[in-house]
């Protein structure tokens, strides 16, 4: 797979049918990964297929070498399976919030959103469920984010993860 700096990728005119901007590399629709950099570090990566972004990841450091915020979007350009979005936020090296969303395009337009808010002891203090949570059971999209649970079911199996004053 081709991996290049975002400066080598060229965005075209907005395509209203696809509701996005097509990307090219050396004059051809780009298929591969391109990276954005900030202060010498990777701040984002995008996966393109035939010129269209299908996966987009953003990293936001906190100034100490750790992540403050992580966002990942899987974009279904065919509008057949659905889009997925994850948002993870840390504060003082502790979780602040995890948000997982799903939009299903298979005729039924199911949506689901699950938000977890953490207290200073890194326990879940509040859970907000919107729509059908079954569609958002995957809470953490990557194995390298140092989180000891990935799915909602795995989270429920953890002991002492929920605060005494849990609000759902």
Image (cartoon, helix red, strand yellow):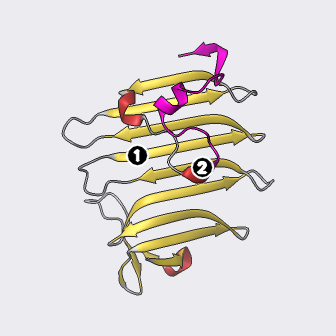
Q: Quadrant of residue 127?
A: top right
User: Could you give the CA–CA distance between mark 2 and mark 1, rounded to whole angstroms?
Assistant: 14 Å
Q: Earlier in the sequence, mark 2 or mark 1?
A: 2
Q: Secondary structure at mark 1?
A: strand
- Compared across the picture, whether 135 is left or right of 166 comes to left
> Where does residue 91 sit, x and y in percent of width and height?
73, 39
Q: Quadrant of residue 149?
A: top right
Q: Is residue 151 magenta?
A: yes
> Where does residue 48 sit, x and y in percent of width and height?
40, 68
At a point 41% along the width and 35% down the height, the residue shown is: 136
Q: Is residue 79 magenta?
A: no
Q: Secondary structure at mark 2?
A: strand
Q: As displayed, is residue 43 above or below residue 100?
A: below
Q: As displayed, is residue 167 above or below residue 153?
A: above
The boundaries of the magenta stretch are: 145-168
Write down the residue under mark 1: 84
> Where does residue 52 sit, x and y in percent of width and height?
36, 66
Q: Quadrant of residue 23?
A: bottom left
Write down the residue under mark 2: 70
Q: How many marks?
A: 2
- Compared across the picture, whether 96 is left or right of 135 comes to right
At a point 50% along the width and 44% down the height, the residue shown is: 86
At a point 53% along the width and 51% down the height, the residue shown is: 142
At a point 61% along the width and 34% down the height, the residue shown is: 97
Instruction: Indicate the quadrant containing the N terminus: top left, top right, bottom left or bottom right.
Output: bottom left
């Amino acid at each position: 797979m081709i991996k290049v700096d975002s400066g080598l990728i060229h965005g075209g005119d907005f395509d209203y049918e696809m509701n996005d901007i097509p990307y090219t590399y050396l004059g051809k629709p780009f298929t591969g990964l391109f990276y954005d950099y900030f202060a010498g570090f990777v701040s984002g990566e995008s996966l393109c297929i035939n010129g269209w972004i299908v996966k987009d990841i953003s990293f936001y450091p906190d100034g100490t070498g750790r992540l403050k915020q992580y966002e990942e979007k899987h974009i279904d350009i065919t509008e057949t399976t659905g889009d997925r979005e994850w948002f993870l936020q840390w504060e003082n090296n502790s979780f602040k919030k995890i948000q997982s969303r799903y939009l299903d395009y298979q005729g039924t337009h199911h949506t689901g959103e699950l938000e977890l808010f953490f207290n200073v002891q890194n326990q879940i203090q509040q859970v907000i469920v919107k729509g059908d949570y079954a569609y958002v059971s995957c809470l953490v999209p990557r194995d390298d984010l140092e989180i000891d649970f990935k799915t909602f079911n795995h989270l429920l199996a953890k002991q002492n993860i929920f605060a005494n004053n849990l609000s759902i």
